[in-house]
Image (cartoon, helix red, strand yellow):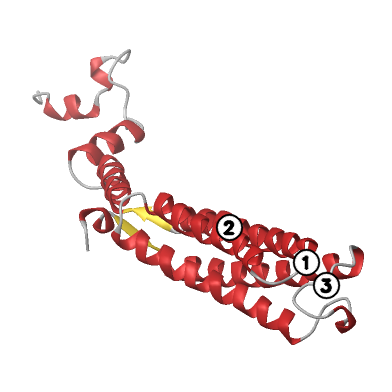
Amino acid sequence: MSEYGSERRVNAVRLWSGGLATAVVAALIILVGTLVVRGVLGIPILAPEEAGYIGGVGTAAYAVTAGIAALVATALLHLLLVSAPRATTFFGWIVGLATVVAAVSPFTQAASLPSQLATAVINAVTGIAIVSLLTSVGATSVRRRRNERLQRERDTSEAAEYDDSGYSSGFRDALIEPPTRRAGGRHRAEDPDRSSRLPRE
């Protein structure tokens, strides 16, 4: 583990919970995008035109592929967080370039231009969602060990300041407890201790 990774502690449960939620969002973007493009715009993508508004098996496979891509991106982010400096910056570049590849790839397929444009837009939106969501999740899943050490030292100093033992507590208790007798404004003969010390005739 590098010096950068040793200063971080990654909350894996929070990171992978966010990764699973991102995978669901990515799959839903594919399904909703296909429904809008096929049903509203009437552009056949991912399946023949007679397959209906949602498409066929190809649409389901594409949505599952988007979810798997989100999980792979989560694994990449986890690896970068524990080992690399500026992990979110590297993650943004890597997944951002992969999104560009996914957006350009439809134009290499034999299909009509509207279908290519629609598929490219869906791929771009899916990639942007994965990058933005996982970057936010990664930022909330990391705690600096240095900050935790400073917090522990601060808590220790505060506990020592209000310690119930030693001189500080005795001084505080002496200030809190009221005096048992008044020292001033009273005749010396009224002092029971002094009267007991006077010589008897």
Q: Which mark is residue 79?
A: none
- The residue tagged 1 is 112
At numbered mark 3, what does the secondary structure look like: helix, strand or loop?
loop
Q: In the image, which disc is placed on residue 44? A: 3
User: Residue, x 66% and y 70% (percent of image)?
Assistant: 109
Q: Nearer the viewer, residue 120 or 10?
A: 120
Q: Mark 3 or mark 1, which is nearer the start of the sequence?
A: 3
Q: Marks 3/2: CA distance?
A: 29 Å
For disc 3, the neighbor class at 10 Å (few under 14, some 14 to 19, many from 20) is: many
Circles 3 and 2 in contact, beta carbons < 8 Å: no
Quarter of the view holding residue 61 = bottom right
> Is residue 115 at all visible to an observer of this figure?
yes
Check the picture and name the quadrant holding the N terminus. bottom left
Q: Secondary structure at mark 2?
A: helix
Question: Which residue is under mark 2?
Answer: 133
* Chain-order first, disc 3 or disc 2: 3
